[in-house]
Amino acid sequence: MKLFLLGALFSCVWFAPFATAAESTQNPAFQAYTRDALSLNGEWKIIVDPYENGYYNYRYEPFDQQENPSVNAFFTDSKQKTPSDLIEYDFDKADTLQVPGDWNTQNEKLYYYEGSVWYRKKFDAPKANKSDRQFIYFAAVNYRADVYLNGKKLGVHVGGFTPFHYEVTGKLKSKDNSLIIKVDNKRHADAVPTLNTDWWNYGGITREVKLLNVPGVFIRDYKIALTSLEQKTVSGSVLLDGAKGGEKIQLRLPELNIKQTLTTDKNGNATFSFTVPDAQLWSPENPKLYAVQVTSGKDKLTDTIGLRTITTQGKQLLLNGKPLFLRGISVHEEYSAEGGGRVKNAKEAQALLNWAKDLNANFVRLAHYPHNEDMVRLADQMGLLVWSEIPVYWTINWKNEETYKNAEAQLTAMIERDKNRAAVIIWSLANETPVSDVRNQFLGRLAKTARALDNTRLLSAAMEKHYRSDNPNIAVVEDPLADIVDMVSFNQYIGWYDGLPEKADKVTWEINYDKPVFISEFGGGARYGYHGDVNTIFTEEFQENLYIKSLGMIDKIDGYVGTSPWILTDFRSPRRLLDGIQDDFNRKGVFSNEGKKKKAFFVLQSYYEKKEQEMKQKQ
Ligand code: GCB
């Protein structure tokens, strides 16, 4: 009896509405992008299940905690054996959705849906050697994924924008495997992000799914960076999974004539360091990438990497030791030009980055969560510097340790995935979070984690301004977080939420940190094609004037090293309900959601052309 009670108590804790950190899968880094794999993208069967009928029995106990789960547990993927069997679902007859993809823009009935949808994919396992190992890899599922293979649970993952994987060695059948995911995008107060955001909560398997086949001992991860600009030293490490120690690894950068043989320690780890005196450094002007080949035993991993350093010196930002000005633009991972929502392939990512290039940008702030890997890899190729952030946005339950663990897991997964991308120069910890002791501690802990994982990049966070109490025309940025980060970044909306654009003529700034200053957001809304005078809100002229005034103001800020105005394109938000103007879109894009240029686009474009010339003259 006691045992039973204990069990009941345990299952209450276990089935909190959002997965606890302990429940959520631990996800050690896994460099999977360039590996050959069986794609599990394409058409998936789906069952929309708002009451989670396929998950809980009528006593609201999860089926997957029962020894003999009912055939009505959806993950059993059951079929009638006799005509009298009562089975109340049938994946074979169910509707379908495309993966990758959000469900909201694929099916009208799901436009506003927040809840659970079951996804099923059937596949045959590819032929493999006996000693090989298999992994199912998800590039991202928003927000919670309960994953089952052939009726057995593989695990739970929370967090909508980072990759995770499960080893399935020995769990695959040669034919007709059933992979089932319950995807749940309900929002929760204790989650990251929390209930309130200014973007659409797109649900679904939003990024690719694949089955990887690797040798018993394989290259799980590697890290490489230019660690000394003066000596041109490149260093890093390789991690073998399944290793005992003493394994040999070959590391090659053929174009630089680098051939190194490394030996693993007992944890399968091997470090390296060498100099590349003749290497070209990566920069927006010359985004030079070098091929890297890592081989060990039967395994081989290939990649391309850029070599550069990013540092600060007082108020200066330095790329490869030279002053850098960030001609930026903020970007949501959304491509609505062809009706779609979340970016679902490299072509859409490329379209967004091409628009940024058209602005003459050299920098994209990928807001407000880690974007897909295509985006970051394309930025590497196109010479666009990147700010990457986690969805620690507005209000977060700072006091809850589970919330902290969740944020830390997302930060870790973001850094682990993109640590070899030269384009990424900044990890951002948070956006517009109200100052308090608990928040400072929370973000302080995140900063420590980020620095321990990666000491070759800068840390920042989008902070806020206030006005001096004795002078309403002096804006101040003062935040304990500014002491922790490398670049003082803040969002400000003078001319939109804060007075009319003319106000920018009067305001001056007090930012007392010996650090570079970056304006991570400013902007205002305009409906493409809506015209009027500069004081008519939501017209292109209003937005154009706001850009002229804002750029004039921020240009005078001491230590100013760049900006990423809000935002590249109009994007869907449930907070933007004004009929005829917003129609569910935040209209602050310099492009419309169809990719049409508003007047403000041209203001920013010519400002960036001017800035580029100024920087060239200085060098
Ligand atoms: C902000 C937020 C951003 C919003 C934007 C707005 O400060 O960081 O997520 O979308 O303002 O449009 O209000």
Image (cartoon, rainbow, N blue to C red):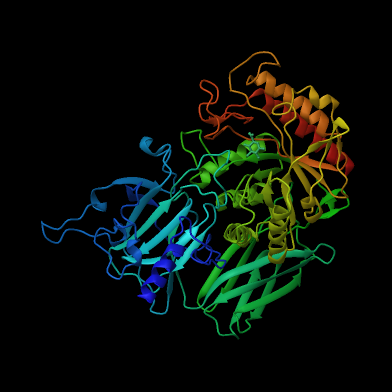
Q: Residue furthest left?
A: 83
Please give left or right for residue 218 compared with residue 115 in the image: right
346 or 457, which is in the foreground? Answer: 457
- State the image quarter where residue 509 is shown: top right
586 or 419, which is in the foreground? Answer: 586
Please give left or right for residue 77 compared with residue 520 in the image: left
Q: Percent from the top left, x then y, of residue 453?
A: 68, 65
Answer above or below: position of 562 versus 451.
above
Give me the residue at 50% from left, 77% from top: 298
Q: Residue furthest front?
A: 1
Q: Percent from the top left, x then y, of residue 206?
A: 47, 49
Q: Percent from the top left, x then y, of residue 35?
A: 50, 63
> How many discs appear?
0
568 or 475, which is in the foreground? Answer: 475
Please indicate, yes or no, whether residue 170 appears anywhere in the rendered image.
no
Please give left or right for residue 424 compared with residue 37 in the image: right
- The image quadrant where one finds ligand 1 is top right
Give me the residue at 77% from left, 58% from top: 309
Q: Residue furthest top?
A: 533
Give me the residue at 63% from left, 65% from top: 292
Q: Percent from the top left, x then y, of residue 76?
A: 28, 62
Quadrant containing the N terminus in the rendered view? bottom left
Please give left or right for residue 465 compared with residue 344 in the image: right
Quadrant containing the C terminus in the rendered view? top right
Please indicate, yes or no, whether residue 343 appears anywhere in the rendered image.
yes
